[in-house]
Amino acid sequence: MTSKNSAAQASGSFVGIACVLLASAIWGTTGTTATFAKGVGPLGIGAVAMGLGGLLLALTASRSILRNSRRIAAQWPMLLIGSLSVAVYPLAFYSSMHLAGVAIGTVISIGSAPLAASLIERIFDGQRLTTRWLLGAAAGLAGAVLLCLAEGAGHDGAGAENATAVFYGIVLGLLSGLLYALYAWVARRLMQAGIPPRAAMGSIFGVGGTLLLPVLAFTGAPLLASWTNMAVGLYMALVPVLAAYVLFAYGLARVSATMATTLSLLEPVIAAALAVVIVGERLPAEGWVGMALIVGSLFILTVPIPGSRRARNAGPPSEPGFAAATPRT
Protein backbone atom coordinates (compact mmCIF):
# COMPACT_ATOMS: atom_id res chain seq x y z
CA MET A 1 0.00 0.00 0.00
CA THR A 2 2.86 2.34 0.88
CA SER A 3 4.57 1.73 -2.44
CA LYS A 4 1.29 2.39 -4.28
CA ASN A 5 0.85 5.66 -2.39
CA SER A 6 4.42 6.67 -3.16
CA ALA A 7 3.91 5.86 -6.83
CA ALA A 8 0.70 7.87 -6.87
CA GLN A 9 2.42 10.84 -5.22
CA ALA A 10 5.30 10.66 -7.67
CA SER A 11 2.89 10.52 -10.59
CA GLY A 12 0.94 13.47 -9.19
CA SER A 13 4.12 15.49 -8.71
CA PHE A 14 5.20 14.76 -12.28
CA VAL A 15 1.85 15.89 -13.64
CA GLY A 16 1.96 18.97 -11.41
CA ILE A 17 5.45 19.91 -12.60
CA ALA A 18 4.39 19.42 -16.23
CA CYS A 19 1.34 21.66 -15.75
CA VAL A 20 3.35 24.45 -14.13
CA LEU A 21 6.02 24.29 -16.82
CA LEU A 22 3.40 24.35 -19.59
CA ALA A 23 1.63 27.33 -18.00
CA SER A 24 4.93 29.19 -17.67
CA ALA A 25 5.83 28.44 -21.28
CA ILE A 26 2.43 29.74 -22.41
CA TRP A 27 2.90 32.98 -20.46
CA GLY A 28 6.27 33.37 -22.15
CA THR A 29 4.62 33.44 -25.60
CA THR A 30 2.44 36.51 -25.03
CA GLY A 31 4.88 39.19 -26.14
CA THR A 32 5.88 37.42 -29.34
CA THR A 33 2.26 36.54 -30.14
CA ALA A 34 1.27 40.20 -29.78
CA THR A 35 3.70 41.17 -32.57
CA PHE A 36 1.58 39.21 -35.08
CA ALA A 37 -1.42 41.49 -34.55
CA LYS A 38 -0.56 44.13 -37.15
CA GLY A 39 -1.88 47.59 -36.40
CA VAL A 40 -3.06 46.65 -32.92
CA GLY A 41 -1.47 48.80 -30.22
CA PRO A 42 -0.34 47.56 -26.81
CA LEU A 43 -3.44 49.03 -25.15
CA GLY A 44 -5.69 46.99 -27.43
CA ILE A 45 -3.70 43.82 -26.77
CA GLY A 46 -3.72 44.38 -23.02
CA ALA A 47 -7.44 45.18 -23.00
CA VAL A 48 -8.46 42.08 -24.94
CA ALA A 49 -6.14 39.80 -22.97
CA MET A 50 -7.12 40.81 -19.45
CA GLY A 51 -10.52 42.26 -20.35
CA LEU A 52 -12.07 39.24 -22.02
CA GLY A 53 -9.82 36.81 -20.18
CA GLY A 54 -10.70 38.37 -16.83
CA LEU A 55 -14.42 38.19 -17.53
CA LEU A 56 -14.08 34.53 -18.53
CA LEU A 57 -12.22 33.82 -15.28
CA ALA A 58 -15.03 35.52 -13.36
CA LEU A 59 -17.57 33.44 -15.25
CA THR A 60 -15.85 30.19 -14.29
CA ALA A 61 -15.89 31.31 -10.64
CA SER A 62 -19.43 32.74 -10.70
CA ARG A 63 -20.93 30.17 -8.31
CA SER A 64 -18.23 30.75 -5.72
CA ILE A 65 -18.59 34.52 -6.13
CA LEU A 66 -22.36 34.36 -5.55
CA ARG A 67 -21.94 32.15 -2.47
CA ASN A 68 -19.48 34.64 -0.97
CA SER A 69 -21.02 37.87 -2.26
CA ARG A 70 -21.55 39.35 1.23
CA ARG A 71 -17.95 38.77 2.27
CA ILE A 72 -16.72 40.20 -1.01
CA ALA A 73 -18.93 43.29 -0.66
CA ALA A 74 -17.59 43.86 2.86
CA GLN A 75 -14.08 44.02 1.40
CA TRP A 76 -14.96 46.54 -1.33
CA PRO A 77 -11.94 48.85 -0.74
CA MET A 78 -9.54 45.93 -1.26
CA LEU A 79 -11.58 44.74 -4.25
CA LEU A 80 -11.37 48.21 -5.82
CA ILE A 81 -7.59 48.41 -5.37
CA GLY A 82 -7.09 44.94 -6.79
CA SER A 83 -9.43 45.54 -9.72
CA LEU A 84 -7.75 48.82 -10.68
CA SER A 85 -4.38 47.06 -10.53
CA VAL A 86 -5.69 44.28 -12.78
CA ALA A 87 -7.04 46.84 -15.23
CA VAL A 88 -3.87 48.93 -15.51
CA TYR A 89 -1.36 46.06 -15.26
CA PRO A 90 -1.77 44.65 -18.81
CA LEU A 91 -1.73 48.13 -20.34
CA ALA A 92 1.64 48.84 -18.70
CA PHE A 93 2.94 45.31 -19.41
CA TYR A 94 2.27 45.33 -23.16
CA SER A 95 3.30 48.97 -23.52
CA SER A 96 6.60 48.05 -21.87
CA MET A 97 7.21 45.30 -24.42
CA HIS A 98 6.13 47.60 -27.24
CA LEU A 99 8.68 50.27 -26.27
CA ALA A 100 11.58 48.24 -24.86
CA GLY A 101 11.17 45.00 -26.80
CA VAL A 102 9.64 41.67 -25.85
CA ALA A 103 12.71 40.32 -24.05
CA ILE A 104 13.48 43.41 -21.96
CA GLY A 105 9.84 44.26 -21.19
CA THR A 106 9.04 40.74 -20.02
CA VAL A 107 12.14 40.26 -17.89
CA ILE A 108 11.82 43.68 -16.22
CA SER A 109 8.14 43.14 -15.44
CA ILE A 110 8.65 39.65 -14.03
CA GLY A 111 11.91 40.43 -12.26
CA SER A 112 10.57 43.49 -10.45
CA ALA A 113 7.39 41.84 -9.14
CA PRO A 114 8.94 39.91 -6.20
CA LEU A 115 10.85 43.01 -5.13
CA ALA A 116 7.69 45.09 -5.29
CA ALA A 117 5.79 42.43 -3.34
CA SER A 118 8.34 42.60 -0.53
CA LEU A 119 8.07 46.39 -0.39
CA ILE A 120 4.26 46.23 -0.27
CA GLU A 121 4.41 43.71 2.58
CA ARG A 122 6.98 45.89 4.37
CA ILE A 123 4.79 49.00 4.11
CA PHE A 124 1.38 47.48 4.82
CA ASP A 125 2.13 44.32 6.81
CA GLY A 126 5.24 45.40 8.70
CA GLN A 127 7.43 42.58 7.39
CA ARG A 128 11.11 43.41 7.52
CA LEU A 129 13.39 43.46 4.49
CA THR A 130 15.94 40.68 4.78
CA THR A 131 19.54 40.50 3.61
CA ARG A 132 18.33 38.09 0.97
CA TRP A 133 15.88 40.72 -0.31
CA LEU A 134 18.64 43.33 -0.44
CA LEU A 135 20.84 40.98 -2.48
CA GLY A 136 17.98 40.26 -4.87
CA ALA A 137 17.17 43.95 -5.19
CA ALA A 138 20.82 44.79 -5.88
CA ALA A 139 21.04 42.13 -8.59
CA GLY A 140 17.77 43.26 -10.17
CA LEU A 141 18.74 46.95 -10.09
CA ALA A 142 22.17 46.22 -11.57
CA GLY A 143 20.50 44.23 -14.33
CA ALA A 144 18.09 47.04 -15.16
CA VAL A 145 20.93 49.58 -15.30
CA LEU A 146 22.93 47.30 -17.61
CA LEU A 147 19.94 46.95 -19.92
CA CYS A 148 19.61 50.74 -20.15
CA LEU A 149 23.33 51.16 -20.79
CA ALA A 150 23.31 48.39 -23.38
CA GLU A 151 20.53 50.04 -25.35
CA GLY A 152 22.20 53.44 -25.06
CA ALA A 153 25.54 52.07 -26.29
CA GLY A 154 23.89 50.13 -29.08
CA HIS A 155 22.35 53.23 -30.70
CA ASP A 156 23.79 56.55 -31.74
CA GLY A 157 22.47 59.63 -33.54
CA ALA A 158 18.97 58.81 -34.76
CA GLY A 159 18.97 55.86 -32.39
CA ALA A 160 18.78 58.17 -29.39
CA GLU A 161 15.00 58.20 -29.71
CA ASN A 162 15.00 54.42 -29.55
CA ALA A 163 17.10 54.50 -26.37
CA THR A 164 14.58 56.92 -24.85
CA ALA A 165 11.73 54.57 -25.80
CA VAL A 166 13.57 51.69 -24.14
CA PHE A 167 13.99 53.76 -20.97
CA TYR A 168 10.26 54.50 -20.82
CA GLY A 169 9.59 50.83 -21.58
CA ILE A 170 11.68 49.84 -18.57
CA VAL A 171 9.79 52.32 -16.38
CA LEU A 172 6.48 50.83 -17.54
CA GLY A 173 7.88 47.36 -16.88
CA LEU A 174 8.63 48.37 -13.30
CA LEU A 175 5.10 49.76 -13.01
CA SER A 176 3.59 46.51 -14.30
CA GLY A 177 5.69 44.54 -11.80
CA LEU A 178 4.38 46.76 -9.00
CA LEU A 179 0.76 46.36 -10.12
CA TYR A 180 1.16 42.58 -10.46
CA ALA A 181 2.49 42.42 -6.90
CA LEU A 182 -0.29 44.73 -5.67
CA TYR A 183 -3.19 42.68 -7.02
CA ALA A 184 -1.55 39.48 -5.75
CA TRP A 185 -1.28 41.10 -2.30
CA VAL A 186 -4.93 42.18 -2.44
CA ALA A 187 -5.95 38.64 -3.44
CA ARG A 188 -4.14 37.27 -0.44
CA ARG A 189 -5.84 39.83 1.82
CA LEU A 190 -9.25 38.75 0.51
CA MET A 191 -8.44 35.11 1.14
CA GLN A 192 -7.26 35.91 4.66
CA ALA A 193 -10.69 37.49 5.18
CA GLY A 194 -12.27 34.08 4.54
CA ILE A 195 -13.05 34.44 0.83
CA PRO A 196 -12.16 31.27 -1.18
CA PRO A 197 -9.41 31.65 -3.84
CA ARG A 198 -11.75 31.22 -6.83
CA ALA A 199 -14.21 33.81 -5.51
CA ALA A 200 -11.44 36.26 -4.58
CA MET A 201 -9.66 36.14 -7.92
CA GLY A 202 -12.85 35.80 -9.93
CA SER A 203 -14.24 38.99 -8.40
CA ILE A 204 -10.99 40.93 -8.86
CA PHE A 205 -10.61 39.84 -12.47
CA GLY A 206 -14.30 40.29 -13.21
CA VAL A 207 -14.34 43.92 -12.07
CA GLY A 208 -10.92 44.57 -13.61
CA GLY A 209 -12.03 43.05 -16.91
CA THR A 210 -15.15 45.22 -16.88
CA LEU A 211 -13.02 48.34 -16.35
CA LEU A 212 -11.00 47.39 -19.43
CA LEU A 213 -14.01 47.12 -21.74
CA PRO A 214 -14.07 50.89 -22.56
CA VAL A 215 -10.35 50.68 -23.40
CA LEU A 216 -11.08 47.71 -25.65
CA ALA A 217 -13.93 49.62 -27.32
CA PHE A 218 -11.62 52.58 -28.15
CA THR A 219 -8.48 50.63 -29.10
CA GLY A 220 -9.67 47.19 -30.20
CA ALA A 221 -11.08 47.94 -33.67
CA PRO A 222 -7.85 46.77 -35.42
CA LEU A 223 -8.39 43.36 -33.80
CA LEU A 224 -11.25 42.87 -36.27
CA ALA A 225 -9.21 44.01 -39.28
CA SER A 226 -7.96 40.53 -40.20
CA TRP A 227 -8.33 36.89 -39.28
CA THR A 228 -4.81 36.92 -37.89
CA ASN A 229 -5.57 39.81 -35.57
CA MET A 230 -8.75 38.13 -34.38
CA ALA A 231 -6.87 34.90 -33.76
CA VAL A 232 -4.27 36.77 -31.70
CA GLY A 233 -7.00 38.44 -29.64
CA LEU A 234 -8.75 35.14 -28.94
CA TYR A 235 -5.46 33.44 -28.11
CA MET A 236 -4.52 36.16 -25.63
CA ALA A 237 -7.85 35.91 -23.81
CA LEU A 238 -8.33 32.13 -23.89
CA VAL A 239 -4.83 30.66 -23.60
CA PRO A 240 -2.43 32.79 -21.46
CA VAL A 241 -5.17 34.00 -19.09
CA LEU A 242 -7.80 31.25 -18.91
CA ALA A 243 -6.06 27.99 -19.90
CA ALA A 244 -2.69 28.78 -18.31
CA TYR A 245 -4.47 29.84 -15.11
CA VAL A 246 -6.23 26.46 -14.92
CA LEU A 247 -2.99 24.60 -15.63
CA PHE A 248 -1.03 26.52 -13.00
CA ALA A 249 -3.75 26.07 -10.38
CA TYR A 250 -3.92 22.33 -11.14
CA GLY A 251 -0.15 22.05 -10.88
CA LEU A 252 0.10 24.02 -7.65
CA ALA A 253 -2.34 21.63 -6.00
CA ARG A 254 0.21 18.85 -6.63
CA VAL A 255 3.60 20.47 -6.03
CA SER A 256 4.86 22.90 -3.40
CA ALA A 257 4.38 26.63 -3.89
CA THR A 258 8.18 27.02 -3.85
CA MET A 259 8.58 24.44 -6.58
CA ALA A 260 5.89 26.12 -8.68
CA THR A 261 7.45 29.56 -8.23
CA THR A 262 10.86 28.24 -9.23
CA LEU A 263 9.51 26.40 -12.27
CA SER A 264 7.71 29.56 -13.40
CA LEU A 265 11.14 31.12 -14.01
CA LEU A 266 10.87 29.35 -17.36
CA GLU A 267 8.62 32.23 -18.50
CA PRO A 268 11.29 34.93 -19.03
CA VAL A 269 13.60 32.36 -20.64
CA ILE A 270 10.90 31.41 -23.16
CA ALA A 271 10.03 35.07 -23.75
CA ALA A 272 13.64 36.05 -24.43
CA ALA A 273 14.28 33.03 -26.68
CA LEU A 274 11.18 33.70 -28.79
CA ALA A 275 12.03 37.40 -29.02
CA VAL A 276 15.42 36.53 -30.51
CA VAL A 277 14.42 33.60 -32.74
CA ILE A 278 11.04 34.83 -34.05
CA VAL A 279 10.86 38.60 -33.54
CA GLY A 280 14.53 39.11 -34.42
CA GLU A 281 15.47 41.20 -31.40
CA ARG A 282 19.18 41.64 -30.68
CA LEU A 283 20.99 42.71 -27.54
CA PRO A 284 24.67 43.50 -26.99
CA ALA A 285 26.59 41.34 -24.52
CA GLU A 286 26.05 43.67 -21.57
CA GLY A 287 22.30 43.51 -22.22
CA TRP A 288 22.32 39.74 -21.85
CA VAL A 289 24.35 40.10 -18.65
CA GLY A 290 21.71 42.51 -17.37
CA MET A 291 18.92 40.06 -18.18
CA ALA A 292 20.87 37.26 -16.48
CA LEU A 293 21.19 39.41 -13.34
CA ILE A 294 17.44 40.03 -13.27
CA VAL A 295 16.64 36.34 -13.68
CA GLY A 296 19.31 35.65 -11.04
CA SER A 297 17.53 38.02 -8.66
CA LEU A 298 14.42 35.88 -9.08
CA PHE A 299 16.38 32.81 -7.99
CA ILE A 300 17.73 34.68 -4.98
CA LEU A 301 14.23 35.74 -3.96
CA THR A 302 12.32 32.53 -4.66
CA VAL A 303 14.56 29.47 -4.27
CA PRO A 304 14.59 28.33 -0.61
CA ILE A 305 17.82 27.96 1.30
CA PRO A 306 18.28 24.31 2.42
CA GLY A 307 17.46 23.94 6.11
CA SER A 308 15.62 27.25 6.33
CA ARG A 309 12.09 27.51 7.75
CA ARG A 310 10.86 28.49 4.30
CA ALA A 311 12.32 25.31 2.80
CA ARG A 312 10.87 23.14 5.57
CA ASN A 313 7.40 24.61 5.14
CA ALA A 314 7.31 24.27 1.35
CA GLY A 315 4.93 21.33 1.22
CA PRO A 316 2.04 21.05 -1.26
CA PRO A 317 -0.94 23.22 -0.30
CA SER A 318 -4.34 21.68 0.34
CA GLU A 319 -5.88 23.80 -2.42
CA PRO A 320 -4.63 26.35 -4.95
CA GLY A 321 -3.80 29.52 -3.04
CA PHE A 322 -3.18 33.09 -4.04
CA ALA A 323 -0.06 32.25 -6.03
CA ALA A 324 -2.12 29.98 -8.25
CA ALA A 325 -4.65 32.69 -8.76
CA THR A 326 -2.28 35.34 -10.10
CA PRO A 327 -1.72 34.51 -13.76
CA ARG A 328 0.59 36.38 -16.07
CA THR A 329 -0.69 37.68 -19.38
Image (cartoon, rainbow, N blue to C red):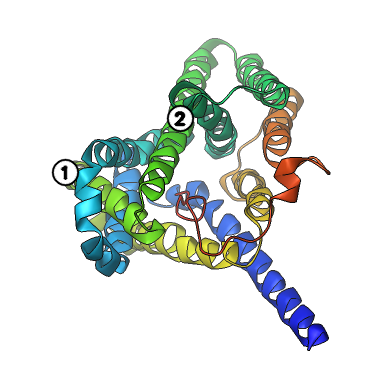
Q: Position of residue 184 (x, y in %)?
A: 44, 42
Q: Position of residue 303 (x, y in %)?
A: 73, 42
- Residue 42 appears in view: no
The vertical placement of 4 against 172, above or below, is below
- In this rendering, which labeled residue sits more in front, label 2 or label 1? 2
**Crowd tier of the residue under label 1, counting other residues whose Cα lies within 10 Å: few below 14, some 14–19, many 20 or above:** few
Return the disc, 2 or 1, that comes first in the chain's sequence: 2
Q: Where is residue 31 drawn, in percent x and y?
A: 49, 46
Side of 91 relative to 30 (left or right): left
Taking the image as drawn, is residue 200 in sight?
yes
Which residue is drawn at the image coordinates 59% and 55% (left, top)? Answer: 24
Disc 2 versus disc 1: distance between alpha carbons?
23 Å
Residue 84 picture quarter = top left
At x 47%, y 53%, the residue is 33
Please state the horizontal and vertical placement of residue 197, each as a whole percent of the image: 40, 57
At numbered mark 1, what does the secondary structure look like: helix, strand or loop?
helix
Taking the spot 24% from the left edge, 38% from the top edge, the residue there is 80
Vertical side of 117 occupied by 264: above or below:
below
The amino acid pointed to by label 1 is: Pro
Query: Which residue position is annotated with label 2?
Result: 178
The residue carrying mark 1 is 214
Which residue corresponds to the image point at 25% horizontal and 59% vertical from the top-left?
68
Q: Nearer the viewer, residue 135 or 146?
A: 135
Give neighbour class at mark 2: few <14, some 14-19, many 20+ (Cα, 10 Å). Answer: many
In the rendered picture of this protein, how many numbered marks are placed on residues? 2
